[in-house]
Amino acid sequence: MTNGWIDIKNTDMMLIMGGNPAENHPCGFKWAVEAKRNRNAKIIVVDPRFTRTATQADLFLQIRAGSDIAFLGGVINYALQNDRIAKEYLANYTNAAFIIKDGFKLPEDGLFSGFDPEKNIYNKDTWNYEAGGNLTGKAAAAGGTVVNTAAHEQVSSHGTAGGGATPVPASLPPNVAFDLDLQHPRCVYQLLKQQYSRYTPEMVERITGISKDDFVKAADLYTSIRKDGSTKKVGTIIYAVGWTQHSSGTQIIRTAAVLQLLMGDVGRAGGGVNALRGHSNIQGATDMAGIFDILPGYLKMPNPNDNDLKTYLDRVTPKAATPSGWESFNYYSNTPKFTVSLLKALYGGAATMENDFAFQYLPKIDRRYSWAEIWDDMFRGGIKGFYAFGMNGVMIGPNSQKNIDALKKTDFVVVCEIYPDETSGFWQAPGITPEELKTINTTVYRLPGAGFAEKDGTFVNSARWLQWKNVAVPPPGECRLDQDILAQIYLKIRELYKKEGGKFPDPIVHASWSYTLPDHPSLSEIAKELNGKALADISDEKAGVSLKAGQQLPGFAMLRDDGTTMCGNWLYSGSWTEAGAMLQRRGTEDPSGLGIYPNWAWSWPANRRVLYNRASCDLSGKPWDPDRKQVWWNETAQKWVGNDVPDFKPDSKPQEHMGPFIMLPEGVGRLFVPLGGLADGPFPEHYEPIESPIVNPLHPNQSNNPLAKKFKTPLDKYGTTQEGYNLVCTTYRLTEHYHYWTKNNPMNVQLVPEPFVEVPAELADQMGIRGGEKVRVTSIRSNYIAKAMVTKRIKPMMVDGKKTYQIGIPIHWGFLGIAEGEGKTAKTPTNLLTPTVTDPNAYTPEFKGFLVKLEKV
Amino acid sequence: MADRKALQIQQMSAHPGPIAGKGMQRQSEVCKLIDTTTCIGCKACEVACVEWNDMPFQPTMFDNTYQTMPDTHWNYWNLIKFNESQHSDGSFAWLMRKHQCMHCADPGCLRACPADGAIVQYANGIVDFQQENCIGCQFCVSGCPFNIPKFNPETKKVYKCTLCSDRVSAGLEPACIKSCPTGCLHFGTKEDMKYLAENRAKQLREVSGFTEAGVYDPDTIGGTHVIYVLHDVTKPERYGDLPAKPRIPLSFTVWKEWFKPIGLFVSMLSFVGVVMHYVLEGPLRTQPQPPVKEIDGGIEHRKEN
């Protein structure tokens, strides 16, 4: 979340889409209800089904799963056409005024400029800003041609600088050409306008199935916060995995970001783009790099071309790129400090200036190792063994049969869980005969772990708060704390490497492991390690801070790139300082009334509750809304002050025109994402899901995301309407269950005892299906059997002139659990149905919006 | 069961004579406010109720709905009723209503109950079942206009929501209120809850476009100590059989209000009659009896007076 849960109470307008917070985040949803009750805020819910969240909506629209970009693009178009945008914000805090290189092409035919059909990637040279100066006022007078010619020279000199076979990787020009009047034909604003002019209400209706009238009602309501040029009101966009789990998932969220930048909603209390996390610590898992392509604190993973630390740091440390006269804090210019401090935390004394701080110990990423790739590798026999902690691999991935078959090919599987799960029990999957069982040679180790209430440590919530929790009960029986299990495995492996050597034992042998009890590392020691400490006496004159060696760091501003500091995650620096455990705080004071609670737990970064909060003020540093004062420029003190911690260079005068988006080299929000930011386009474009009931009306010849990754094993099949798969299917969770755990808990089973399939009443009538009768849902991959829940909450829709039905399936049941054990279910996991196809940016599979057929059993 | 020292009994089922301590201290009437317009059907209240009252789990069946079970049960006192409501104007609503004992000001169950002290009404308005006095006749079941009391065939007793009288007597809110994540549930004095409810209904009418929004606190039973804010107060039946005008069945009114007093009156009359008879006629005097005689070998006994 750019903002936080409590902050939702400050909003005037909510667009809830790609998420079902009342269902999946009921405690957090209280703040949406607060806003409604206390501020008369409006809620717009857009979802394939009338959900629990929809019960709270002022306006509910049923959308076809997988058509979100079309809807949001339509709202962007509506805002631009009706002048419902935040002009000052747009021109100064986003890259709307920046001029894009000549040769950049919008995807009218479905492809941006630079597509390489052979490699299926984009050459992004034209996805860049033009170098040059201030063209404000010149564009209209000079006319497009002259400016274009001038610009073209810039392109040639910059874009072909390297020439020949080894082009120098393109970088942002340090001196970006811009037009503050937003009139230049190639300025981002004009391109954006052109891009979304195709997303007319008629087009939105064809793609999404939402009637033109309903769409206009929603677009009008959401953008009403900027009616008549007012900047006082704020709208928020709330989403979850209903947006991420698509073959264009990242771009859906980008579309929301573009809309929020147009509205001037980012950085403001009650605004922002807010991802709701579906697990208690999934934010923490992401911060700590629970994915293959980042290091803790979102630092980039080295690749095999990064021969040494310098090469790596040169590649990943961004250089400021701003229009002349504008400033950019470019906070990621501190990447070397973050990196070296991380290396010191990882390898301790073995990381020295002389050996590049053991940079060579870090793994180098030569290709994708995302979830889908791991299981694909395993399916192809390339993975011998598998450790699963805190997740049920068979159940959570798409195409479960492939995952089950993949596990059959491993030598060993180690699963740490609190219940026997489907991953450690993959050999109990339906369809495995006693004969086949004899042929499976996988050894399964079940390690009894500890539940969340049986260990202390932190949860990082969606609002980025690190909150400490205490142990409620000790782990029962022989269960052990996860960190103990991991530590003991590590120590054993280290011992083996020390004794027997290996290809490259150094990273394992030299890893820093300085815990008081090495085989029972305490989580408070680990939290302190993440915060970081000084390794030598250091001081910062300007800030008036000096630290003795061994002292905890007060924050990431003290990090050094010379090995005198260590820090496990720069974002967490400040969470456990010499003043104590900030993340254990329980102060309930909220002087501003904005729900900031600065003394409750600790929020990364630097205890800031709303990111980019400089943007909550106008150019002169005064809050857009004096009733919701977050931060402001104090002329007397000559610094930024506020109720929240300013997310800005504290002494940067408003006149310096420093951009509020300090994590980006431009300092401004990106309507247009230049260069390598995204794999599949600088602007979001609607592509159909891989399995879609229609051909993309925008560009029939390029219906799907050209960069979405399909897999090629015999089990990776993708269905079409021609094969009879005519229904759009989506998957989701229920309030009453938590993923695949609670099917083992009688209380939850009492609340929702059995799996079911939600079927629109009209379709059920046609097919003669009554509620409670068993139905079979079939995708090209497999089938799923459960009872039908016939409901009026899903209506038939007209999609591109075709009557289209959607059905939905909750994901919670598998083949081990109470209902499963009692023989009440067909033991079919929902994900048997879903396709393995991934988004090109975040590599998330498309669990929502695939094709199936339905029949009575 | 509540601490009777803290909760003053106001009424008691089938209790002859005065109630000890009644009216000794003034207690404000409590009230639970359920704002159905902010209920998200999360069932936290259901779980809290089961957990607090330590009730055994029972198997449920899929029934084509998100609703946990068709109706409340002797060990499931709090149930959110889910209703898909398609209206003639094309609009659609998914209505969620937390269903439990309404704690009527004029409780039909209490009126119907023939067992002394099996049902009591505290001065704060809570209607509570005292299972140790329950005789299992189930008259309360038919007396309730909301179909709340539920019979446990094993213990032969009847059970229902106590409005957490145990918690309330200790100054705590009921468990369901404590668990509600959206603030759709409130607990306080009847006066405060009415104020809150009316304000919310006003907001719904004026801001949210629910022109018929209102507060459900039916006067046909003297009001209730559980009140609802409804999107459309003119159509409470949409929320899963919430009666527009709940009434105690006439038979119980007839029985308790008429027959019982009449019965009492008749029995009084008969007593008075006996006394009058004694006064007027005097005691029964012994009549001279003929001696016992044998008839056909049999013996005719005659009692001596």
Image (tube, rainbow, N blue to C red):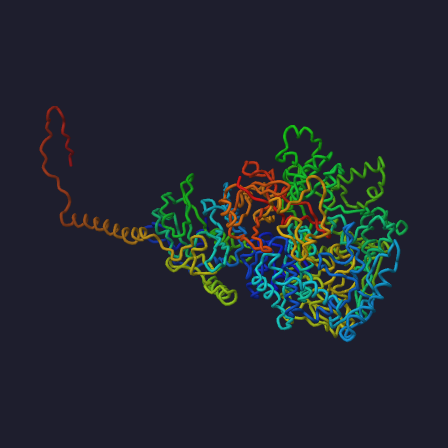
Residue B22 appears at what percent x and percent y? 38, 56
Based on the displayed image, in which of its 4 quarters is residue A855 positioned? top right
Q: Can the viewer see residue A514 in this picture?
A: yes
Residue A540 appears at what percent x and percent y? 83, 62
Image quadrant occupied by the N terminus of chain A: bottom right
Residue at 10 percent across and 28 percent down: it is: B293
Of residue A471 and residue A348, the one placed in the foreground of this image is: A348
Question: In this image, A285 relative to A320: left or right?
Answer: left
Say above or below: A497 vs A848: above
| Residue extending farthest right | A354
Q: Can the viewer see residue A529 in this picture?
A: no
Of residue A553 and residue A398, the one placed in the foreground of this image is: A398
| Residue extending farthest top | B297
Of residue A173 and residue A3, the one placed in the foreground of this image is: A173
Question: In this image, B87 relative to A665: left or right?
Answer: left
Say above or below: A549 vs A767: below
Residue B187 appears at what percent x and percent y? 49, 58
Say above or below: B91 vs A503: below
Residue A5 appears at what percent x and percent y? 63, 58
Question: In this image, A164 relative to A25: left or right?
Answer: right
